[in-house]
Image (tube, rainbow, N blue to C red):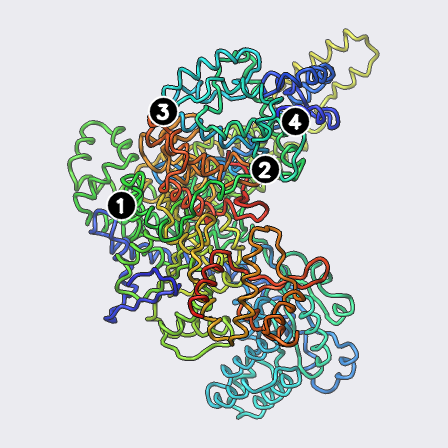
Amino acid sequence: MGVVLVNTCISLSKFLSWPAEETKYLPASSTVVEDDGTKVRKDKAQLSVSVKRFVKKLENISDNEAQEILEEKNYVAALGICAQGIMGNGSNISGGEVYSFQTPKRSNKMAELASELAQTPEKNVAPDDSKCPEKMAKTPQSSKRSGSNKVQQRSKKKEFVSTTPYRLRKRLAAPDPYLESESEYSASCSEEEDEDEQKEVSAVLSDQKTPAKTKAASTPPPRNSLAKKNKEQKMGNLVEEYFEAHSSSKVLTSDRTLQKLRKRRLDQQTLRDLLKNAPLAYAAEIRNLNQQHESLFSKWMLQLHLGFNIVLYGLGSKRDLLEKFRTSLLQDSVHLVVNGYFPSITVRSILNSITEEVLDHIGTFRSPLDQLEFITKRFKEDSSLELYVLIHNLDSQMLRGERSQQILAQLSSLPSIYLIASIDHINAPLMWDQAKLSLYNWLWYETTTFNPYVEETSYENSLLVQQSGSLALSSLMHVLHSLTLNARGIFRLLAQHQLEKKDNPSYPGLSFQDFYQQCREAFLVNSDLTLRAQLTEFRDHKLIRTKRGADGVEYLLIPVDDSTLTDFLEKEDEDV
Amino acid sequence: MSTCSVSKGCFVFKPSTKKRRLSDKTAHDFRCTSNDSEDTELRFVTCQSLWNQIKSETEQIQENLNKQLLDNLVSFLSRSHSDFQEKTTDWTCRMKFREIPTAALVLGVNVTDHDLTFRGLSDVLQDNITPYVALLEAKDCPGIKNLMQKLMGQLMKCDIDVDSLEDEDCVQVSQNRIRCSMPSLISWYDSVTKKTNSETPSKKRNSSSRHWQSPPVVVIFKDMESFTTKVLQDFIVISSQHIHELPLVLIFGIATSPMIIHRLLPHSVSSLLCIELFQSLSCKEHLSTIIDKLLLTSQFPFKLGEKVLQVLINIFLYHDFSVQNFIKGFQLCIVEHFYSQPLSVLCCHLADIKKRVYSLSHDQCESIRRLPSFRRYVEKQESGKQIELLTNDSFLKEETEKLLGDLHVYHENYVRILRCLHVFTSSLPKYPLGKQIRELHCACLENRVWETEEYESSLQLARMLNKTDLVTMLQQCVEILMSSSGKEFDRAVEKLKEFLTQFQNLEAEASQERDVSVSPQKELQKKTDLYHLQKTLLELKESRRSKKLTKFEMLRFEVVDYIDSLVRRYLAPADERALHEIVYFNGAAVLRGHLNAAPRTALHTALNSPHWYLKNQALRCDGGGISNKAPDICIVYKLHLECGRLINLVDWLEAFSTVVMAAEEPNADAASSDQVDDVIHARFIRAVSELELLGFIKPSKQKTDHVARLTWGGC
C-alpha cells in the first residue's frame, strides 16, 4: 500500500501540480519495501525539481486554511459557546471534526488498533510511545534488530510464538509461496500492487499474538521544523487521502466468514441470557449520570405545560429514563406510550389508540388526516382533556417518514397534548424541516445515558443473531396443513430438490419445466395449468419465490434457510 | 403494566380515579427543584403575567406591522369585483376576459411565521369583505378533487357561521352529499346570496353593513410553491370558466419571489390571472421592531444579557429567520430565569418592588448577599456600612430597594442614550459599531463600549461629519431625550439645543469669512526644482497641522466630546451594576443547548471520549485516544473507524475480543483460546446492533458477513 501511496502522490504532483512537498518525507515515513526502493528513488529525483516550486504554494494554502479555521472559530464564538458545567456536551468540537469526507483505510488498520489498544496497560503508556506513529516505526533500515528487542521486552505480557520479528518475516514474505497459499484475502477487485499488502495483513491476523506493530526506536525528524512540517503534511495528507479514497470503488476486505470461525450463531434467547449475566461496566457512573437527568423531571413537566415539547438525544437508551419519568410523574394523568422501535408501529395505530382508548370513540376513519382532524376537534372542544405522549425512538424506521412526522407534528402542536420523545439516529434531525420544527416546538435535552439499547435492538434482525426459524417453521407447517395432499407433495418435491442442491451457492432454483416434469412423474398434477394454480397458491402465502433467469426460464425457490427446510421435511415425514 | 410487548407498540394509561392534573398545578412543577419554596407561587405568577404581557405586546406589534399590508389587500379585494356588484350590466365584457383577480403576497422565507399573517388576514377579510374565505394548504390538496373538497368544506362552514344555527342540519347534510364540483359550488353560492338578499330587512342591514350583497369568494393558497402545478393549473382553468357566475379572488402566499408564479404556471394559465403584487415587511425589520419594543424599553422588568441576546439573534440570522422562534426563545429565557433564579421574585414592576423587598425572608436576604455583584458593591462601601449590609436585614432591604430603583433608572437612561448614539453610528461609513441598534446594544452590554476600537474609530468618523448631517442628528437626539419623562436629561437637552443655535450662528458668520481663504496652491504652480518643491510641501504640511481649526470644526469637536461624555456616563454595561443578576438573564449555554442543540456532536463526544460523561479514572486517556476499558460500544466504534466502506464482521469481532480480553485480564494467556468467548461474542453483537441503530453501519449484501459503513470523519 505504501507503494500505492507514493504513486498516488507522484501522479498527483505531476498532473494536478498539487503541492507535493510531503512526498519528500514519504519514502522515509511509509512502509516502502526495499524491493521497490529503486523505483521510488527514481521518482524522487524527478520530484525534487518540482518540490521547490510548490513549497510556496503550499504556504499560501496553509495560510488560507488558518484563515478558514479562524473564521470558523469566529462563527462558533458568535453562536455563544460557553458550554461549561457538567452537562455541557462536547460543543468544543468544531463541525469539521465531526463531519469530514471519506478517508482511505488500509485493511489491517483495525487489527493494528486493536492490538495497540490491547497492549495499553492500565496506566497509560507514555504518550510518545503510544502515539508513535507506526509509519515511523517502520523505518526500513534500522528497526529490525532494535525492534525485536523492544518486542521482547514487551512480551512479558504476550506470548511470543515466533521469534522472528514481524518485520523480518514480512520481508521474507514476498517470495514465499507458503504464505501466498495461506492468504485468505481478496479484494472485490484485487489489484496487483496490493498483493504484498494483503499478505502482510494475513500474517498479522493469522497469529494475533504477534504484536502487529513493532514499536521501534526511530529518529524523529529535527525538532525545529517539525511543527511546520506536520502541518504541511496534514494538509497534504488530506488532499492525498481524499483522492485515494475516491479513486477507486474497489473495496479491500478479508474473505473470512463467520462460518469458518466454527462459531455457532447465538439466537436471541441465549444472547439475552448471556448479556444478562455479563456485568454492566461503569454501573455507578451511569447511575450517576442518570440521576442528573432525573433531577430535570419537574422542569420537563413545567416546560411541557408551557407549550414546549421535549426531545431527548444522546448516546444510550433513553427508555428507562422515560419510563421513570412516566412512573414518577404521570401516574395521575392520561398518557400514551409509543414504542417507536416496535417493528410494525404505524402512525395509524398511534392515532387509533388515541381515538379508541383515550377518546373512547368507536368507529373508523377514512384517512389519518380525518382522524387527526377529529382528534383536534375533540381536544379543542374539551379543555379539560389532556394527554401526555411519550414516544421512544421518534426516529425509528416506521415513523421517520415525511407523512408520519407531519401528522405527529400536528398532533404535538395541540396545546393540550404534551409530547416527550427520544431520538437516537445520527441523522434524526434531518427528518424535520422548518415547518415541522415549528409545529413540534422542541426543547432539546441532552441525555447521554450509556445504557445499552436492550429493548430497542431486540426486535432488529441483527446481523449476527441467528434467526431461530421457529416462527417460519410453524407458519410453514400451518399453511401446508390446510392444503391438499397433492399440493403438499408438490411443495415437498421442491423442498427436496432445493436441499439436494444446497451445496451449490449459485443454485438459481428449479426451472418450471423440470418441476412440471417431476410432478407429472409423481402423479401430482396432470397439466401445467394445475401446477400453475398450485404455485399461485404458494406464492400468495409467500412459500415460494419465482425468478426469471437470464434465459427467460422461470425458476422456483423456497425462501427459507436450509436448516428450517430440513426440519420441515423431518416433521412432514413424521406426520405421514 | 409494562410497556414491553412483542405484539403492540402503543400503550394507553388512564388513571383509574379520574383525578386529572389541572394546569394550576403547573406552579407545583415550578417549586420542585428550587430549594426555597416560599415565593415560588408568586414567582410563577409573576413569570406568567410577564409572559402574557409580552405575548400580547408582540401580537399587537405584529398586527400593526401587517396593518398596511392588510389595508392594501382589502382595498384590492373590494375593487376586484366591483363589476360583479353592479350586476348583469357589464357581464359580457367580463366574460370575454375571464380573468381571475389574484393577489400575490410575497411573505419572505420564514414560512413558519406565515400562519399568523394568514390568520390575521382571514379575520380581517371576514370582518370587512366577505364571509367566504377558504385557506388551502398544499399538504391537504394532493389532487384537484381534494382541493375542491377542502374548499367547499371550508366555504360551507363559514356559511353556517353567518346563518347562525337555524338551518344547520340541512347544510350539514348537503355538505356530505354534494358532489364537489364547480357547478355545485356555484349553485350553493347562488342560494346563499339569494337567501341573504331576501332576508328580513333588519338582518339584511346587519350583514350588508359588513359585506356586500354578493361578496367575493376568497381562496387563499398558503404555500403556493409546494402545490403541485397540475392541481393549480386545473383549478385556475376550471374556475376561470365560471368567473362570471362566481366572484372568485385568489391569494397566493409566496415565500420566494413572484417569479415563481410564472415558473409554476404556463403562459396559457397565468394569462387567466390578473395579478397584483403585495409585499410584506421583511423579517429582519420585523425583528428590529420586536427588539425595539420588547428589549429597548423600560416597560418590562425582565432583561436579556448580552450572550443570551447574541444567541437568539444568531439563531434568527443563521438558522431560520423566524420571528416566532425568536419570541419562543424569549419565552424560554423568561421561564428559565424565573425558574433558576430564586431572587427573580424581585424582577417585577417598580411599583411592586417595595412590597416584595420588605417581605423577603432571612434566607432570601442571605442569597442577596451571596450575589457576586452585590458582594462587589459591598466591598466598595465604607466599613461601617459594610457591616450593616452584611448583618442587618432591614438595612439590606432598604439598600436593595434603592439599588433596584437605581437599576431601573439606569436602564431607562441607558435606552435613551443608546438611541442617541445609534443616531450617530448608524450613519457613519462602514458602520464600525453596526448598522442596527441591536448590534450597538450587544456591544454596549458586552463591555465598556468606549474602550473598544470600534467606538474609537466611529468617534473619529463622527468628527468628520458635515454640518447638515450633524444638525439633523442633534435634532433627532433632542427629540429622543425630550421624550423621556424624567428630568435626568434636561441639562443634556439644553446643551444640545445650545449646540444647535451655535451651528445656526456659524452659518451667518461663515458667509463673511468666505473670502479670507488664500490658496497656497498658487505658490506651487511657479516653476521650481525638486528640492524646493519638497521643502514647500513640507512647510505646507506643517502649516496645515498647526493650522487653527475653524469655528465649525471646534464646535464639531465639542459636540462629539459631549456625546462621548454621555456615553461614558450612561452606557456602562449592565453587569457592572449591583443586583443585575435579578433582572438580567445570562444563561446563554442553557438556552443554546435547548434551542440549537447538536445531537451529532453529543454522540461523537460520547463515543470518542466517554470520560467526558463517565467520570471514571480508568477512562481517562490523554492524546485523543481511548482506553481499552471503555464501554463496548466505544471500542467497537473506535475499531470501525479504521475500516473502509465495508467491514468484515469476523475481523471486527476478533479485534474487539483482543481488546476486551486484554482489558479484562491483561496478564492472561490470550493466545490459548482460539475461540472467542461467548459472552464477548454477545457483547460484540449488542454493540454492533447498537451502532446499527445509531446509523453508523448497515448490513450489506455485497459480501458475506460484511457491513457497510455509513459515516466518515470523526477519526
**Kind of residue indicated by mark 2:** Phe
Residue farthest top in this picture: B531
The residue that label 2 is drawn on is A101
The residue that label 4 is drawn on is A4
**Kind of residue indicated by mark 1:** Leu
Query: Relative to B637, does residue A26 appear above or below in the rendering?
Result: above
CB under 8 Å between callouts 3 and 4? no
**Picture coordinates of residue B678 (x, y %)?**
37, 42
From where the camera sits, is residue B291 visible?
yes
Task: Name the subunit of mark 4.
Answer: A
**Kind of residue indicated by mark 3:** Pro
CB under 8 Å between callouts 3 and 2? no
Which tag, 4 or 2, sits closer to the chain's start?
4
Q: Nearer the viewer, residue A115 or B488?
A: A115
Residue depth check, mark 4 versus mark 1: number of the one nearer the observer = 4
* Discs 3 and 2 share one subunit: yes
**Picture coordinates of residue B210 (x, y %)?**
55, 79
Q: Nearer the viewer, residue A527 or B283?
A: A527
Task: Name the subunit of mark 1.
Answer: B
The residue that label 3 is drawn on is A121
Which tag, 3 or 2, sits closer to the chain's start?
2
CB under 8 Å between callouts 1 and 2? no
Instruction: Give the CA distance from mark 3 to mark 2.
Output: 33 Å
